[in-house]
Amino acid sequence: MSSAVAGPCDSEIASTALPCSTSYPRATLTATILGSSLAFIDGSVVNVALPAMAGDLNASSAQLSWTINAYLLPLGALILLGGGAGDFFGRRRLFLIGLSVFTLASILCFAAPSLGWLLAARCVQGLGAALLMPNSLAILGSAYTGEARGRAIGVWAAAGAIAGALGPLLGGWLVDTIGWRMIFLINVPIAAAAAYLTWAYVAESQDRHRSPSLDWAGAGLATMALGLLTWSLTAAATASAAGSWPWLTAATGIVMVGAFLWVERVRGQHALMPLAMFGTPIFVGLTLLTFFLYGSLSGLMVLLPYLLIRAAHYSAIAAGAALLPLPIVIGLGSPLMGALTARIGAKLPLVIGAAVVAAGLALYGRVGIGRMDYWTDILPATLLVSTGMGICVAPLTTTVVASVDVSHVGVASGVNNAVARIAGLIATALLGFVFVLQGSAETFASGFRIAALIGAASAAIASACALLFVTDSAAYGSPHRRRTNVV
């Protein structure tokens, strides 16, 4: 998602890679951290740059959404294929290819002469991220074993939280002092350092047994379906798209979804998204919970900085700082919640955490032109949302990986991660209905309040999914762990 927050199951992908030795563990860890940080930083810095980009490139409301969705679309649709390709062709090789693609696209974003060029470059960035993200974690998992692997994953997670916290601040400072184009150029030295460390010190690893063939058909259908549905949702918010085209496009996208599901059923365990994992209610419930929870969070991460800059006249760096509690609270709360989940189960934390997120989003409903003081109106709601996510992230990750057979933890983690990013994609497309309300600051603030209440309802649905579907028998370490045989 386009946020400073990692996907719910990112770290678990690393824990499922087959072990191999490495002579350079620190260089390997640093390379994977730098590679992952590219995607985290790039997603978060764009949010605070949207107003500047809109003014400079004369972007419409629909086009504002696409500056984010052009990145999220290939990332969400292809991240599973990227991981499978790494297993088949070599994780180090695919990681380096992803870094190269991402870096080239970042340079193109920096030099884009028009919005169309920028959107095309953002799409290529998403493709690069879909290659480097899963393979950076798989490299980490293959380089460490035992307790060392756990410590390495912990360091990686902490570094991701730091990157998520610094991203909006750095991006805001660059927008205010140099210009929005520099937010893309900062990727180049980071990617260069990651590429050098990977080339010089990271050992190649692969596992063709886990990926005997790649689901190109499934990946293509998923990309086309998401693209059509995203375009139809975005176009529906603009007066210029009046008529039947958005509906026809949406219908075609739904047909593509059906074709994708058929292909996945035929491919069985070799599918991009094995449908047999959805044979148990708990995995279905967790997938729905992830979709609604991360969809509500993604909408907030995009709209709040834009509101503060446009309606409250914040600087870009101040708007980025307004989001700082989110990665900090999640980073501090996740280790505590992980230990607590092992003792009491995941159901109660997930129900309470999602409900707290809903309460925080509902509290944003008070925000308006006459009520936009940061300390009394913005910070309390932000702290509630941050606390709720801090409660949810670790139990959600734990329960997802415990809801399937141990041999399919990596697939389940990848699917859940992709669902979180697709939720962000759809939520951002729907924000076009808010971006179109830019006639005045009060009008936009009114749209923000409506979006916040819709996000609160979405988080409340996530809480209900936890209440109805999650059982404590799926908690980490439980002897009654559910298993799903993917065939």
Image: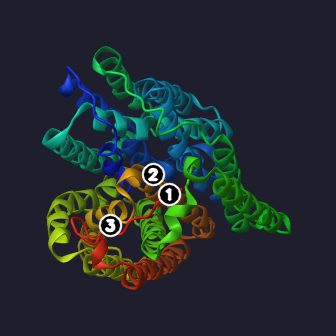
Question: How far apart, in angstroms, are the residues tagged by discs 2 and 1?
Answer: 10 Å
Q: Which residue is mark 1?
A: 486
Identity of the residue drawn at 38% across and 59% down: 405
Q: Quadrant of residue 60?
A: bottom right
Q: Quadrant of residue 321?
A: bottom left
Does residue 438 appear to the left or right of 383 in the view shown?
A: right
Question: How far apart, in angstroms, are the residues tagged by discs 3 and 1?
Answer: 17 Å
Against 223, residue 442 (above or below) is below
Of mark 2 and mark 1, the one earlier in the sequence is 2
Residue 319: % across, % down: 35, 57
Dot 3: what SS?
A: helix
Against 151, residue 318 (above or below) is below
Q: Which residue is mark 2?
A: 411
Q: Nearer the viewer, mark 3 or mark 1?
A: 1
How many residues crowd around disc 1 within 10 Å: few (fewer than 14), some, or many (20 or more)? some
Q: Is residue 370 visible?
A: no
Q: Which residue is mark 3?
A: 399
Q: Quadrant of the C terminus?
A: bottom right
Dot 1: what SS?
A: loop
User: In front here: 378 or 219?
Assistant: 219
The residue sitting at the top extreme is: 200
How many residues crowd around disc 3 within 10 Å: few (fewer than 14), some, or many (20 or more)? many
